[in-house]
């Protein structure tokens, strides 16, 4: 009896700590953004223009970009101040609710508290939270991770089909916010396959979920091209052989040519062997970013024709056949990809954004702390799972849903464009640090209590 009273008091104390942490999180966020000036960067201009296109027109749905974020802006009257206010409120509420959710669903409250507070420390970091004051897709891209994880967890725990529908709806909208999000969502087909294998969903649910994900990927990929050319040329991923240069992927490709094709001997020799036209004009673009000359210089006409017909497929073939380059370059540039510090460039952090409030840098930027905590937790989680012979359960499956897209996005974002690698890969260290505290969550639920295994029939309730 006394033991139960003590446990209740401890849990009550933990609740106070969690709510106090949420309060600090909100105050820290508000203090950091108090003097922020709205930053109208060039991509935001495009989103505003797109959001004012009539909703029921072909141009809005298929004209320029994935429609999720323009719909969000349109719902707020294309008012930048309302967009920023909505993003900020949604960000604070979502991650606060997620920390509460982790605590309430934890079988071991101490580790539920540690995970919830740890994730609040991550999302308050300026490299992440500052994006809520840009009218860009990064803000919603970070925020919706909380809802994806919550709906997945809730389905695994309650086995109610409505949470699958909530999850699918969130994934569909998520994939249409930002073109690279479609690749993130595509990895959930593996998650649904695991659910089917453990009889959490039936084959019809698997087919439905997979079909929705594939259709959404195709729709997002098709509308990501910023142009209205032929169907073959509009696809960002699956470009057909033609004499027309697709608009969306060309600029990133030219960045790759100037900063990688012409600077790496292995890649240069391979592309030359595959027919890339070489002349002095092309060589003079070494270490240059894509610009008007790539499109208009008559001396690059044969080069442009080669790019349109087979340039992207040759590059993808090279990455597949040369894993030492593909993964070796990722290792050499690991600091750009996996760390926040270099991502905090002045043109991305808004004027007036404070970076020294309360605990932001003293805790968040201690990379050594995170490194050792990550590996130590990973070892304990692995051992606990092996000893219990319960690799896939309600706590570990969402970890897979975090790790799968990380592996895909590392290759895709780094090798997809040489320009602005810091910004394009920003989601990767964010997902890794969220994964770290989710591992803490798994550790507490696995080692200190009996886990809930993935077994049993799916409920249609």
Image (cartoon, rainbow, N blue to C red):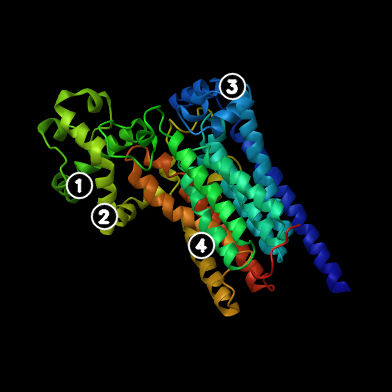
- Work out which quarter of the rendered image holds the C terminus and state it: bottom right
Taking depth in this image into account, of 365 and 75 the one nearest to the observer is 75
Taking depth in this image into account, of 37 and 439 the one nearest to the observer is 439
For marks 4 and 1, give the one nearer the viewer: 1
For marks 3 and 4, give the one nearer the viewer: 3
Q: CA distance from mark 2 to mark 1?
A: 10 Å
Q: Are marks 2 and 1 in contact (CB under 8 Å)?
A: yes
For marks 4 and 2, give the one nearer the viewer: 2
* Secondary structure found at label 4: helix
Picture quarter containing residue 271?
A: top left
Q: CA distance from mark 4 to mark 2?
A: 27 Å
Rate crowding at label 2 as few (under 14), some (14 to 19) or many (20 or more) other CA atoms within 10 Å: some
For marks 1 and 3, give the one nearer the viewer: 3
Residue 406 visible in this rendered orientation of the protein: yes
Q: Which residue is mark 2?
A: 325
Q: Are marks 3 and 2 in contact (CB under 8 Å)?
A: no
Report x, y in % for residue 71.
Answer: 58, 29
Q: Quick one: label 4 or label 1, which is nearer the N terminus?
A: 1
453 horizontally vs 5: left or right: left
């Amino acid at each position: 009896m006394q033991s139960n009273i003590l446990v209740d008091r401890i849990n009550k104390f933990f609740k106070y700590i969690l709510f106090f942490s949420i309060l600090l999180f909100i105050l820290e966020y508000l203090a950091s953004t108090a003097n922020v000036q709205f930053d109208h960067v060039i991509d935001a201009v495009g989103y505003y223009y797109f959001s004012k296109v009539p909703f029921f027109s072909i141009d809005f749905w298929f004209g320029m970009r994935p429609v999720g974020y323009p719909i969000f802006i349109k719902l707020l009257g294309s008012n930048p101040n309302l967009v920023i206010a909505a993003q900020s409120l949604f960000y604070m509420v979502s991650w606060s609710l997620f920390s509460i959710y982790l605590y309430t669903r934890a079988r071991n409250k101490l580790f539920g508290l540690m995970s919830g507070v740890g994730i609040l420390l991550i999302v308050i970091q300026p490299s992440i939270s500052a994006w809520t004051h840009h009218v860009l897709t990064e803000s919603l891209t970070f925020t919706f991770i909380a809802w994806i994880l919550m709906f997945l967890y809730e389905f695994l725990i309650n086995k109610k089909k409505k949470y699958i529908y909530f999850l699918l709806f969130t994934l569909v909208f998520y994939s249409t916010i930002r073109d690279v999000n479609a690749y993130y969502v595509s990895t959930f087909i593996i998650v649904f396959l695991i659910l089917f294998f453990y009889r959490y969903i039936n084959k019809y649910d698997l087919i439905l979920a997979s079909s929705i994900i594939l259709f959404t990927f195709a729709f997002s990929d098709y509308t990501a091209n910023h142009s209205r050319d032929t169907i073959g040329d509009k696809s960002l991923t699956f470009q057909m052989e033609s004499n027309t240069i697709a608009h969306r992927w060309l600029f990133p490709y030219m960045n790759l040519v100037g900063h990688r094709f012409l600077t790496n001997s292995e890649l240069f020799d391979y592309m030359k062997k595959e027919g890339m036209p070489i002349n002095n004009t092309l060589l003079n673009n070494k270490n240059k970013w894509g610009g008007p000359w790539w499109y208009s210089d008559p001396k690059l006409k044969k080069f442009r024709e080669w790019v349109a017909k087979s340039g992207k497929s040759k590059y993808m073939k090279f990455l597949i056949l040369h894993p030492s380059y593909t993964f070796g370059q990722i290792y050499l540039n690991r600091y750009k990809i996996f760390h926040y510090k270099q991502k905090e460039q002045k043109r991305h952090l808004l004027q007036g954004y404070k970076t020294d409030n309360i605990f932001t840098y003293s805790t968040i930027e201690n990379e050594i702390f995170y490194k050792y905590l990550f590996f130590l937790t990973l070892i304990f989680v692995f051992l606990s799972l092996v000893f219990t012979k319960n690799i896939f359960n309600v706590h570990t499956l969402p970890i897979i849903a975090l790790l799968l897209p990380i592996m895909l996005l590392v290759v895709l974002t780094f090798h997809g464009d040489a320009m602005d690698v810091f910004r394009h890969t920003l989601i990767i260290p964010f997902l890794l640090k969220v994964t770290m505290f989710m591992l803490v969550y798994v550790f507490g639920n696995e080692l200190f209590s009996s886990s809930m295994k993935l077994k049993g029939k799916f409920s249609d309730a």
